[in-house]
């Protein structure tokens, strides 16, 4: 029996790196959470009703809030606006304040930081804390451009805050983990990285492309592609032939692996 060679250090590093790419799934999940937040805020705009709604959340650093999404009755849009809570209603909410409704003056300084995310300045607002367990991690803001927002709307907004908290919990966790991954990756692949991973990865890909098995697969894929370009019937015929060849190869018990 041939002795088993020691693991290739590059292969080990590459495996470790690729295993972290599971974090890319978190990005897709976080985007889905943004859509979920947007749909919940859009529903609020229709049900309460109000003109626009948003959430402002502590994602990583304390003392800074991110507005991931803004919604109106027609839909939701990603924002990414970052603000300091000081001087905004969210400072009061983060400090343990309860939900409240307020009239807003033109160019009201209380919401000046939020105006870049809004279509137009509102005249009324409701502000609701978003809680995760015993902690307040941000708040939701619902705005009206004409009709006042009173006790009925405030009660509905508080129920909305409870629903938003469930989505925010997953969104916030995923964003933090992915942000950490995204920040670490340049350190691994950058020109000043302590390892030779970038160059080794290029060599590995180049060597892979030179393997006979890779060339066989590539040539076969190109041939099938040329046949499929002629139409659906030809594509179906090529797929049928390949299925029969695969069935034949399986019948050989794997003896045909090196003979293609």
Image: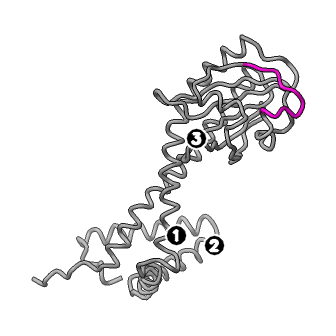
For this rendering, which residue is in front, 229 or 42? 42
For this rendering, which residue is in front, 4 or 85? 85
Label 1 sits on residue:
186
Q: How busy is the neighbourhood of tag 1: few (under 14 within 10 Å), some, or many (20 plus)?
A: few
Q: Examine the image and state in which quarter residue 55 appears.
A: top right
Q: Where is residue 142? Give x, y as percent.
A: 73, 27
Q: Is residue 109 magenta?
A: yes
Which element is circle 3 on?
Answer: loop
Q: How busy is the neighbourhood of tag 2: few (under 14 within 10 Å), some, or many (20 plus)?
A: few
The residue drawn where x is 73% and y is 31% is: 53
Label 3 sits on residue:
58
For this rendering, which residue is in front, 100 or 223? 100
Residue lying farthest to the left in this orientation: 1
Mark found first going from the N terminus, 3 or 2: 3
Mark found first going from the N terminus, 3 or 1: 3
Measure the C-alpha gap from mark 3 to mark 2: 52 Å
Magenta segment range?
A: 101-110
3 and 2 marks in contact (CB < 8 Å)? no
Measure the C-alpha gap from mark 2 to mark 1: 40 Å
Which element is circle 2 on?
Answer: loop
Measure the C-alpha gap from mark 3 to mark 1: 24 Å
Residue 224 shown left or right of residue 229 in the figure: left
The residue drawn where x is 25% and y is 73% is: 254
Residue 242 shown left or right of residue 52 in the figure: left
Does residue 152 appear in this view? yes
Tag of residue 229: 2
Q: How many marks?
A: 3
The residue drawn where x is 87% and y is 27% is: 105
Mark found first going from the N terminus, 2 or 1: 1
3 and 1 marks in contact (CB < 8 Å)? no
């Amino acid at each position: 029996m041939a002795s088993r060679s020691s693991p290739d250090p590059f292969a080990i590093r590459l495996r470790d790196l690729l295993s972290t790419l599971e974090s890319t799934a978190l990005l897709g999940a976080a985007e889905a959470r943004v859509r979920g937040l947007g749909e919940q805020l859009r529903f609020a705009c229709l049900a309460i009703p109000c003109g626009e709604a948003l959430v402002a959340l502590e994602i990583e650093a304390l003392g800074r809030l991110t507005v991931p999404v803004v919604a109106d009755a027609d839909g939701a849009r990603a924002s990414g606006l970052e603000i300091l809570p000081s001087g905004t209603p969210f400072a009061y909410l983060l400090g343990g304040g309860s939900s409240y409704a307020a009239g807003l003056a033109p160019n009201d300084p209380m919401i000046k930081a939020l105006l870049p995310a809004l279509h137009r300045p509102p005249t009324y607002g409701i502000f609701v804390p978003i809680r995760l367990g015993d902690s307040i991690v941000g708040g939701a803001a619902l705005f009206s451009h004409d009709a006042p927002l009173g006790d009925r709307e405030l009660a509905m907004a508080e129920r909305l805050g409870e629903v938003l908290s469930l989505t925010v919990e997953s969104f916030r966790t995923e964003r933090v983990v992915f942000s950490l991954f995204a920040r670490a990756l340049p350190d691994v692949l950058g020109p000043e990285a302590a390892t030779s991973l970038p160059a080794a990865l290029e060599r590995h890909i180049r060597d892979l492309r030179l393997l006979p098995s890779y060339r066989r697969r590539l040539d076969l894929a190109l041939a099938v592609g040329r046949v499929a370009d002629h139409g659906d019937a030809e594509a179906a015929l090529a797929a049928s032939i390949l299925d029969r060849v695969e069935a034949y190869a399986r019948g050989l018990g794997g003896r045909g692996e090196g003979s293609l």
